Image (tube, helix red, strand yellow):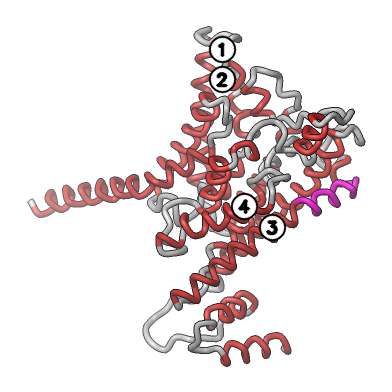
Amino acid sequence: MGLKSSLHNLKEKYKGTNMAPAFNAIHTFLYTPNDTTHHGTHIKAADDLKRTMNTVIMALIPCLIFGMFNAGYQHHLALGEIERATGFLDSIFWNWDNLVVGLWKILPLVIVSYGVGLAIEFVFAVIKKHEVEEGYLVTGMLVPLIVPVDIPLWMLAVAVAFGVVIGKEVFGGTGMNILNPALTIRAFLFFAYPTWMSGDKVWVHGAVERDQLIAAGENLDAISGETILGSLAQNKAAGYEVMDMFYGIIPGSVGETSTLLILLGGLFLIFTKIGSWRIMLSSALGAIAMGLIFNGVVDTGWIGEGSKFYGLMSTTWWHHLLIGGFAFGIVFMATDPVTASQTNKGKWIYGFLIGFISILIRVFNPAYPEGVMLAILLMNVFAPTIDHYIVQANVKKRMKRLKVKTA
């Protein structure tokens, strides 16, 4: 009661001032707003935008925790200090040194992401004199999960500032942006600092630093840290079992490796009616369709083992769902209600094209064998157009039925 009373007093003290949005945001984040409506009929519901965002964050927490364990595991494994895990609950979870390394590297990413992003949100709220928007609550959690573990914090801060200002605020804030803010941040990082976002050294903690020491003359063993996509893009064997891919015991971005936890998070979002099952399912179907096409091309012999596209083209079609950031992208970012299609039929088209284009980019761009980011951003742009034609088609059908009835 003491904290609630103190916050309420501060809220009343700064009511009507420029700082009111800041205190209102903190108050309504912790407690249900005590404002009531006096006119008209309103739908009563237990949720609001903050609670919806918090639900998505809850779905992301298992991926974050596993990412911390996996970051430490990949680091110690690369140094030869532990044996390769054989199951989801093997040495990843029972070796607490893994968690220590993960916390040390990933927690600062979360702090910087939320610190910079929310600070900009508060500044814009004060300048524009409106309530602080809750959209960054999810973006702030997504960003640390889709970047390499060793990315410099200042780069992340610059990217977050760019993504929030250019990707959202210039369009009018939450609900008005046409591009997913988290993917806008990742795209900025990829194009502004490509050496920190691709290659075989950025996915395992310490690999880049160790490589620099070796180049300086230190007698150390190099760390590969190569991802499955990186290996396949170079026509090399992936070196991981299917269950490793499913559990997520592989190098990759912090929260994108465990298909198991992403699947559970997706089911949770569907159960709470926050994530669209149509987009998730159609994206998977699009990826499967493109994977089958490529497998068919390889089976016909048109593409030989000497082709630079052979490794990813010959990858079993359903393996594409388990590797890279595909599963994470379609569950947590393609389903963003602001940037996705709004009509039911549009969601099927939107999702199918995301999956289809993701695998297309993955195969034909060996330098960047991960296409889900670019596919989602591309379809974010076309989502309003898809919905427009779906709505117009429905209007025409109804007009035809009306003419038949009046004839």
Residue tagged by mark 4? 143
Quarter of the figure with residue 32 = bottom right
Q: Is residue 308 above or below residue 45?
A: above
The outermost residue toward the left is 407
Provide the residue designation for mark 2: 313
In depth, the one of 59 and 21 nearer the eye is 21
* Among numbered discs 3 and 2, the one appearing first in the sequence: 3
**Residue 110 shows which numbered tag?**
3
Q: Amino acid at mark 4?
A: Val
Give the CA separation, mark 4 to mark 2.
30 Å
Look at label 3 and name its amino acid: Val
Q: Which residues are magenta?
A: 94-105
Q: Are marks 1 and 2 in contact (CB under 8 Å)?
A: yes
**Label 2: few (<14), some or many (≥20) within 10 Å?**
many
Q: CA distance from mark 1 to mark 3?
A: 41 Å
Q: Residues within 10 Å of mark 4 (few under 14, many from 20)?
A: many
Given residues 1 and 98, the one toward you in this image is 98
Q: Residues within 10 Å of mark 3 (few under 14, many from 20)?
A: some
